Amino acid sequence: MKRMNPRWKAPPMWPSGVGSRQPNPRDSALRRAAISGNVLALPPFHVPTGRAVRVFICANPDDTEAERNALKEHVYPKLRDFCRENYGIEFQVVDLYWGVDPEEWDSPELQRLRMKLLEDCLKTSAGPCFVGLVGEKYGSIRVPGEVESAEFEMILDAAVEAGLDTRILEEWYCRDENAVPPTYYLKPKAQMLKNYQNSVREPITSNICFPICPPFGMESSSAAKSKNDKAWRGISEEIKKIFRTSVLQLQEKGTMKSAQAKKFLCSPLEDELDFALGKQTPAFLKKCVCYIRKIANFDRHAKVPEMARYMDIITDIDGRVMRNQEAYERLLKVRDEFIPTIVAASNLRVYSSITHCDMKLGYSQEVESHYVEGLCKQFYEDMVDIIQATVQQNFDAETDPMYDELLQHLSLCKTFSSIYEYKSETLDLVQEYLYPVKGSRMSPLVVFGGPCAGKTLLLAEVAKQAYSWLQKEMGPETDPVVIVRFIGTTDFSTDLRNLLQSICEQIAINYRCLIHFLPQKIQEMRELLVNLLGESSFNRPLVIVLDALEQLSDAEEARKLWWLPVNLPRTVRIVVSTLPNKHGILQRLRGLIHDEFRYVELTQRDRKACSQTLKQQLLGVKRKVTSGQQIYVNEALAKCTLPMFVNLIYREVVHWRSHKDVDDTSLSSTVHDSIERLFFSVQDKLGSRFVHRALGYVTMSRSGLTEMELEDILSLDNSVLGDIMISSNLKNPLRIPYDLIARLREELDGYLIERQVRNVTLMVWANRHLQLIAQKLYLSNEEDVHQMHSLLAEYFLGAWAGGRKKIFHCDNNHFAHFSHHKNTSQHHHHHHPSQHGHDKSGTDKYSYDRQTPEQPWVFQCNLLEPDIFFVNHRKMTELVYHLSRSGRTDDLMYGVIMNFSWLYTMIKIGHFDKALADIDLAYSSSQEKELKFLATTLRSIKVKVTRNPASLSAELQQRLLPVVTSLPKLRHLLLECDKDGPKYCSIVPLHSSMDVTYSPERLPLCTSYMQIVEILPTLAQNIVIVALEDGSVSTWDVESRQLLRQIDTARSVVLGIRLTTDEKYLVVATTKNTLLIYDNHKSCLLSEVEVKCSKHNPITGGVAFINGFTLSSQHALAWLEASKEVNVIDLVYGWPLYQFHCWYEVTCVQCSPDGMYAFCGQYLNTTSIFHLGSGDKLATMTSEFSGGFVKSILVLDTINQMVMIDNEGSLSVWSTKEVTNPRLMEDYDCRGDDSEVVGIELSEDQRSILICKARSIEVLDTKVWKMVEKFKAKRTERFVAAVLSKNGQSIVASMENTSSIFVWRRDSGQCMASLIEISGAIVKLIKSVHHNMLLSVASSGVLSVWDIDIITAMSNIDKTGKRIQSLQLSGREDFVFTMDGSESIHKWNFSTGFIEMVFKHEGLVENCVLTTSGDLMVTSDDKCSQYIWQTATGDNIFRINGQKITQLLITHNDQFVVSLCEQNASRVWRLGTGHKVCNILVTLQHALITTANTFLVGTTKNKLLAVSLWSGSVSKKFICDDGITIVNFKLIPDCPDYVVFITSTETVFIWSVADESVCRRVQMPANFLKNLEDFQISPNGKLGIVSKGDDNINVLDLHSGKLRLVHAAGIIWRQKLSRDGRYLVYICFRNCEEDDDAGVVSSLIVMRLADGKSIGTCSLYKTPTFLCLSQRALNIIVGFEDGSIGTYTVVDRVDAALKIKIATSNSRQIVNNAAQKVRPKCSTHAFKTIADCIWRESTEVFSRDSPINLSDSGEAETTTPTKKSELLQ
């Protein structure tokens, strides 16, 4: 270990400074405090970053309704998206008036809750926290909910003195002696108003029209509510009047002070403004905004009835309506005095606008709408401004898993310690233990106790106080380190390896130790921990607190506690806790720690102490219980004194009033009952359905829910909305009121706690006991649970986001009568099962926007920098869990597993193993083979993609493209890679020739294959039934290697086993000549039947065993050795039916698929047909090849034919249309190679029959009954077995004494793949027709299960079999022509990657050129011949003999060919006719034709020559000095008359051909070109790219002569510059062991020359032999050593157009077809045997039948190449 810089942290994934603000020094201090465990130094409300932006809306509810509704519908969702995308945090608005019944707006409970939430927002919001909406209305004063008795009595006296009737106060207010001091409280409406409870429980009919009549009972409930509302309005006004008059009178007398009177005289608006803005710092006020709306000359409109909403009005004695001047004055005081005063002293944002009324209508809807529109725009801008100024982008939790884990535990520590109320001597004991001593080594301290004993709360308090305790004890200069983990609360903490790793990393950071690498073995991790403990000192003591050891998973034997350090250094303390009787943890601790003083048990406490604690808690909130009530409290405490029970009693009695009737049932006697009572009381207050679903969702979530998520989810739940849409209008957005969530949180405060996870705050249960009871109460109905999981899955999928409306329907009767809705506009609907059964109009009518947010996998901060993002961890954590629980396998497969963004993000954030686990989970539930293949593929590329996640798309595409036709469901992932992959990697594979790496599932059955009798595949993909010679018949799951069922046949030796087609019966044949019939699913014996021979036909030679048996759906048919009879047995009843009597000894039996007929094969190639129902013999047939016996019978039921195949492979075909009179149709003789038939297979479509013999494999076509393919084995080899692929295009076979499975292509006969079976030589192949699986048995007794689909996918890759030496791409870029050093040129379809044509030559092909269009191809071979080919038809239309050609060129206008020779004169000849134009007498090397078709430029020794194409003479030349040679030269494409060349003196020349002058000369450094391998020039001639065989790219500026080095990823093998000069494509080899392990040979890399950045990397898993770039689109073609090609395209994301060329590529066309891909037939075209023209020195001789004109282009012919003079014109 080495010392290191104190600011050590993991290498950042995200660049620093991506946010809009620089990192705050305070944030760094908070990080240091968090890492060292100084909990008290962290902010009180969040750890250590803001949990969310929470904005409190302060307003009068009635005059701002339009503003608040518009903000809710249009602005809040946008701000929420802004915060999520740019900061990864929530934006939440607290508007408690929204969605609440207007009659409840002045409720004392609501006003109290508003003030509480206002305080929370001010304290906890990460950004803006307060918005005031002030209009022309001051608002009504409050109805006091609770008044101290002294005040109330004083007000009552004052009211009497003022002559007011006080009976209403005396009636509605009741004295409560339980308050300290005593108070008078307002009685609930439900208690005072008649039928109030029923009226609010029933739905009202606001905004609901009933077409005929309302449902029964609706009218009465609605009328009762209206009546109650009216009564309450009168009562509340009377109460307010009494209080106002009395308080003003008392204030005038001086009896009541102004501050005391204010709470009775202020409106909620003034109270909230004063609380939020008064006495705040200027820095804090920057987070607040006020919007003031003034209405000019508003008083004159007071009489308009609608204006009562916007101003305070009163009615005078005469009944005139006028403005309330007193309220107006108070409004002016707040609006025009208080707020301006705040503005003057700070930077508070205040916007004031004056609105002018309509002359007649006053403040009309049109005027209001105009104001609201402006407010919405301004509100959005202000919020964004404040958020950008105050919220910092926090990537710490994204980039540092250890820091994120640490924050989660610190968050819980703060929460748990805040509810630790019961100080005890145990805390003092732990405190004493923590102090370092100078004695010997110490042991850990163990705290144990039963459930709810307070262990977690105690350890949280210890972790919170430890830092300060140690500082007080050892001095302020001491800097302790405290590490706390609450095991089981996070995924990381339950796993021992992750737990130890995070602790080690935290210790290393604190003590500045550098861990070079993390150990792979868990034992080494434990050693690392022990070593790190030694870093502590008296100056920096270390405390580790581990809560709930019993929550550790049992992996790595964690619960045996072998990893726990027992002998601790003097300055290290470890405190652990556990349950006493769980997993034997405490017993193991006692075996490790022998000191009894190191054990602290938390037991039930003394009743009196608990009673005293309870009393103190009540006094803390100014409450107490009466002496009569205390009796029942004492009785409850006598039964239980657990801390949690005491707290639950407190939660109950704190609400008791002094007049409440209390008895022995008022309190529960156990923790369990108390929790249930608590939940039931919450249900009574908030509604049963709401609480059921809300707490159910929190409980079933994987890691808790945020407030906003719970609000969103409940708003999607129609059953909840249907229950609470009371006195609320149905309108967009349709959401539950936040008031309900706030009240739920308040009711369960301390039980439903907050937990910080990255940038969000989740609601979770405080302990497991609460979780279990909530699960029992709210998640017991399976149907409800399934529905809830499904809704959570929809939410995290974002199914209803982006304005997609969800239909609203409910089981309640009153919702079934909706026939009208305000919003009649048509909207797009997201398809969902819940909408089934509704017509379009009905769906639109009752569909509402629920305002749920979009759920991308990542929130992209910067679209130009795709790697800067916030991960949507909530979706990552929850979605897979809920999809699997709700059984939504399609959504799981396509929404998650086959989603590239999910896969990329999981790998990017280091959760590769978690992604694999999720894929395995999805596979286990769906059994889709695509998922299994994907998991295998990802495991094979783990090292590469974890090191470079950007390469994921290219790596996946290379592997998936070859198999996508066999595994079509991978198409979705391929399309996802196409869509999102180019953001990170610009190389997109179009056609992949990568060999599929595949490993089968293996199951060891026994020690030798000799012990295996038979193996049967089943309908289940991974289930097989195996019979062994010891008499056991076992059913195995091959994948999990689990034995599912086993049958013991009473030690009988098994001869064979069979399954009926429906797998209901399993029949076993034994050597006792019995058939045992079993129920396959229950493994129980149904019957045992003996197979006998008849008395009429006894068997000679003694005892005979069962020779064979077969099954139909209802019958078993068995026959003995050398027997002529077949026994027919009824499977259902288990008794023999009858015997079929045949002419000769029976050799095989086959039943027809319909189970009606049995075909019995015999010796002398005879077959008899029997009726299975009656036992009658219907017919007998004998083949003319009667020397052998019938080996197999095939029934082709689709065409009514039966095929007899004998032991030598000969077959006879019979028509069974008339089953009693079969007719011979065809006899096919296959005798001749003296080899036995080892296997026969009928293809799935019944069009082919495969006959596998020991020495050959033959395939017959059943249409014509001819052999279409025959594969012969080598002389020393023998076939074991062979099968057809699903599409019948490939043959899969195994050979004797080999451990390989071979795949042959039927059309070409090529062996496309050889798969090694590591278990030994293959002795048997069995094909499962159900799943297209192949079972192989090795000599070692190991069963392997291969997927034939994947195996045959390997044969989809075309190969020439020899290394690709050169490539030519046609001008239209639709075909590729390859040379591989053979006599053939192969024409490949660029779109499909298939070879379509082969052009055969007489000799080995040496040169090949194409015309621009690609219609004609000119080639030459080593037999001195040149050929002209028509590429579309494959015809060799012209042949020239006579000269050996070294180089071929075609002019750019496709009119002339240049054939260069070394020995004789080179020639320019006309492509259209074959006639010579001129001879070239000089020898040129590496020649090029200028773009103007004027000159042929080439080198010879020290000269650069330009030869005229029309005369053949040297027109221009450049001669180097003696001893200097020309190393390389290039033409500049955009400048046809200029050549760039390099000489051996390290000089680069730019030479004008026209002027024969050097335009520019650039001198390179000495020895720079010593190892020159390649030289590329940009189209404009400005840049030269030089490669020298090293790992540097040399970019030469030909104008300035400057040289720039760009480091490549490895040693460059080939490089090519794109046609536009923007990109450099190169292949390099890298020396990296990790890549070698993964099979990587080299890498294909694209570099953007503008910035030198590599924009794409793609690994190549074969040795490349040729690199080619297309001229138009940037397509790359690579030729490989095995004769295959790979094609790629480049999609640079900085291109504005971003035209992805993938849509036209091979895989995308193939996979768009649902049907299996049909390979086009490859045609071979031969050369002309007779030459059309012979060249002799300088003349040519044409044959008579030579074509006059070869040209079919239709272009006008020119007699000569273009002259230079013509060009100049």
Image: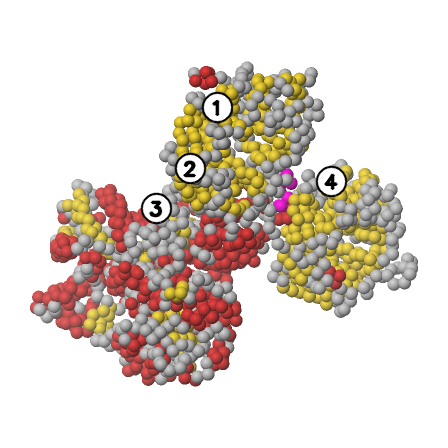
Name the amino acid, label 3. Answer: Lys
Colour pattern: secondary structure
Is residue 200 rendered to the left or right of residue 356? right
User: Mark 4 = which residue?
Assistant: 1269
State the CA–CA distance, disc 1 to disc 4. Answer: 61 Å
State the CA–CA distance, disc 4 to disc 2. Answer: 63 Å
Q: Residue at x 62, y 18 (%)?
A: 1738
State the CA–CA distance, disc 1 to disc 3. Answer: 88 Å
State the CA–CA distance, disc 4 to disc 3. Answer: 74 Å
Q: Residue at x 45, y 62 (%)?
A: 517
SS under mark 4: strand
Q: Report crowding for label 2: few under 14, some 14 to 19, many 20 or more residues within 10 A (C-alpha).
A: some
Sequence-first tag of 4 and 3: 3
Q: Nearer the viewer, residue 157 or 1391?
A: 1391
Name the amino acid, label 1. Answer: Lys
SS under mark 3: loop
Sequence-first tag of 2 and 3: 3
The image quarter in which residue 1602 lies: top left
SS under mark 2: loop
Give me the disc on residue 1486: none
Sequence-first tag of 1 and 2: 1
Answer whether labels 1 and 4 touch (C-beta < 8 Å): no
Label 4 vs label 3, nearer the camera: 4
Name the amino acid, label 4. Answer: Glu
User: Mark 3 = which residue?
Assistant: 822
Q: Residue at x 85, y 53 (%)?
A: 1146
User: Mark 1 = which residue?
Assistant: 1517
Sequence-first tag of 1 and 3: 3
Q: Report crowding for label 4: few under 14, some 14 to 19, many 20 or more residues within 10 A (C-alpha).
A: some
User: Mark 2 = which residue?
Assistant: 1564
